[in-house]
Image (cartoon, rainbow, N blue to C red):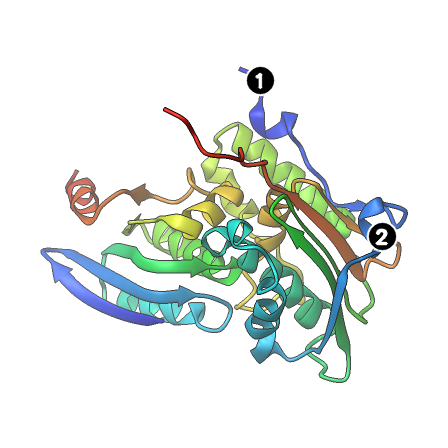
Amino acid sequence: MENTYLSELKEIKVDEGSPLFDKTNMFYKEFPSDFRQIRYFTLLIVQTAPLEIKEINLLEQQISEIIKNAVKHGNKCDPERKVRVWYSFSPQHAHLVVQDEGDGFKDLEKWNDFNRKRLELLSRHDFENLQDFVSYRTQLSDDNDGGNALFAALEYWNGGFVFNTKRNAVAMLKKYPQKRQGISVE
Amino acid sequence: MELKIRKNGENYIIDVNGEMDLYNSYKLKELVMKMLEKKVERFIINLENVDYIDSSGIGALIYICSTIKKMSMKLIITNIHGSVKKVIELTKLMGYFPITNSIEEAIQQMDE
């Protein structure tokens, strides 16, 4: 069988020209970088999403990760620095742009390399060596950093996950399968 | 998040209640480390009453799993469902974590 992990290899891209950065008709909110309020800020955004895409908290959880990265890794929890969020939801999609005032995700290429190795090990079911690739850590990581949020993000945001040139803004799109309309007839 | 420990033979079952998020996941890590200090060798982490987990929660489970593996102790994570299962699947860790569908199955596997 073809290698399923590598055949669908996904990478974090840098592409400021991506249509995902088009903010036309999107809602907007901004927050101070208060670590204690990350889940609350996330709820304020997610509450505008239609019920059918709030599926089992997953949308909330995925958005919360991106806001956490902006607050903690981007703005270093400095309450003077803002996190800006543009968002739009429908039963078929969730589209967000999250921007912080930090120096940008400098380790992006290193992260992609790390993720490639992780996927190679997974494809070989090499769980012994996977041990060293389950969590992406840098010198700035602390005990509460799971080091795995972006692995899931790349899988979840199936319509794209791209950074701007400065790498302090990320745009993402999730497409949901269209549910069949109407009443079923026996 | 609330943590309760119960004993079944040699197995220590940790029932996790509530959300495993960026504010509280460290508590589970701390509890397991304390239990290891007290020479507990067999852990079953029951996630039946956990409906929300984020990367910090997954990170705590990774830390616990790798520490217990290194010490050659035993761990099983059980009753994963809903978004918890989805997040573990998105992270592609279903094959990495030792997982069972029920506590009974976990106890049976511990004895094998």
For mark 2, what is the residue?
Answer: A22
Vertical relation: B4 (above or below) A109:
below
Find residue A2 and name its label.
1
Residues flagged by tags 1 and 2 on a common chain: yes
Vertical relation: A88 (above or below) A91:
below
Q: Residue A87: where, in percent of width, then height? A: 71, 59
* Residue A107 shows in the view: no
| Residue depicted at 19% across the width and 60% down the height | B12
| Residue depicted at 20% across the width and 40% down the height | B109
Vertical relation: A14 (above or below) B2:
above
- The front one of A150 and A45 is A45
- The front one of B86 and A139 is B86
Chain identity of mark 1:
A
Q: Residue A176: where, in percent of width, then height? A: 60, 41
Crowding at label 1, few (<14), some or many (≥20) Cα neighbours within 10 Å?
few
Q: Residue B36: where, in percent of width, then height? A: 29, 64
